[in-house]
Image (cartoon, rainbow, N blue to C red):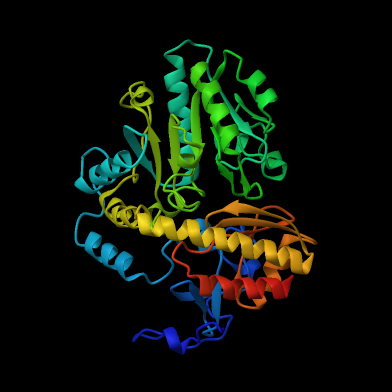
Amino acid sequence: MTAPTANSMTPATTHEAQPASAGLPPAMMSPILGTYKRAPVEFVRGSGVYLYDAEGKAYLDFVAGIAVNALGYDDAGLKAAMHAAAEGLIHTSNLYSTSPGEQLAAALVAKSFADRVFFCNSGAEANEGAFKFARRWARTQGDVKHEIIALRGAFHGRLFATLAATDRPSYRLPFRPLTPGVSIFERDLRELDAALSEDTVAALIVEPVQGEGGVRVLDAGFLRELRAITKARKIALILDEIQCGLGRTGTLFAYEQAGIEPDMVTLAKPIAGGLPMGAILMTEEIASAVKPGDHGTTFGGGPFVASVAMHVFERLSDPKLLEHVRTTGAWFGKQLNDIAHRTSRIRQVRGAGLMWGIDVMGTSAHVVSEALSRGLLVCSAGDYTVRLLPPLVSTQDELLRGLQILEEVL
């Protein structure tokens, strides 16, 4: 099985081949701030589950924009939704109502535990907003409740409050002092039970699958215990499903697999098909504590982005797609375990749906680099974990091709 050539998937309007360096200045010369160590490749177009560089080389994508491009590339339905949205309003501000945002919020409520939705522009913003809403709600129970608790291995964003809840010493150290009142505890029920007994705790934030933290799937029983504790002690449970939500693990929301209902869920990444959007889903109890002026956003939930997100949400909530992710994901996990057995170069395999991590012998950066040179895009989730996040529409044949390359690299 071979990857499609540039010609086999080139649309009527083609891109003229250019030197690999075209449009790519050396990192030290780029006017873009160097907050990312970018790979030495420039992508100019995509089709299905493939990206193409300026020379026409195909790369099978197991990164999907870090779980953003759930529908792959050059999707006809998504493009049509964008064209249709562009015929309407682009922006009005949140001083006024527009129907796309109202319709999207209603769809999210209808498919979830939630009663209300707040739209913003990113995952970090969604988590920051959730922290504020949790504290606003907690204040209705007494002035001392304000602390936010996160778990070891968490990644919730790089803004000040979310950075304080992110377990990455190298990310945190240059920006101390961080936001006070945010603490990180071990993924241990006994320790968390003690921490949550404090009458100052307003909220606990948890990723059902810790993506940046090594693709660690939290046990359903553990999540149920945390829900029981937080509910009994009037502590808001926030589930960060920015990476693991919206179909990535085989159900629309990851919390469904534990049989619980949180107080808030934060979403982003795939929600608008690559356009910037985040969302906070919440119960009426939380929402009723938030008053006009408590929070805001200039662009969040604007008519253009919300209209596109409505199309994406309908696609991602399709039972057929979710079943595809469950069955294909189970098959994918088995293939990874088989590779681990054959190569002895994988120490552990973890994941669910189409969200997987493998702990490798050697560094993840080496595997990422070698895979790139062979036409496969993967990313890291720590120094020794390779993360695999293929588009949710990937077929078994496409996934098998990527697995073959990965095994060659290992």
Q: Quadrant of residue 119 in the image?
A: top left
Residue 149 position within the rendered picture, expressed as x and y whole percent measured from the top left: 59, 28
Look at the picture and state if 276 lies above or below 399: above
- To which quarter of the image does residue 111 belong? top left
Q: Nearer the viewer, residue 328 or 152?
A: 328
Q: Is residue 131 visible to the viewer in this orientation of the structure?
A: yes
Q: Nearer the viewer, residue 394 or 19?
A: 394
Residue 158 in sight here: no
Q: Position of residue 16 (x, y in %)?
A: 45, 88
Q: Residue at x 70, y 72 (%)?
A: 407
Query: Of all residues shown, which one is farthest toward the top?
Result: 142
**Is 61 displayed left or right of 137 in the figure?**
right
Q: Quadrant of the N terminus?
A: bottom right
Where is residue 344? Give x, y as percent: 79, 64
Q: Quadrant of the C terminus?
A: bottom right
Identify the residue at image location x=36%, y=52%: 317
Please give left or right for residue 148 compared with residue 362 in the image: left
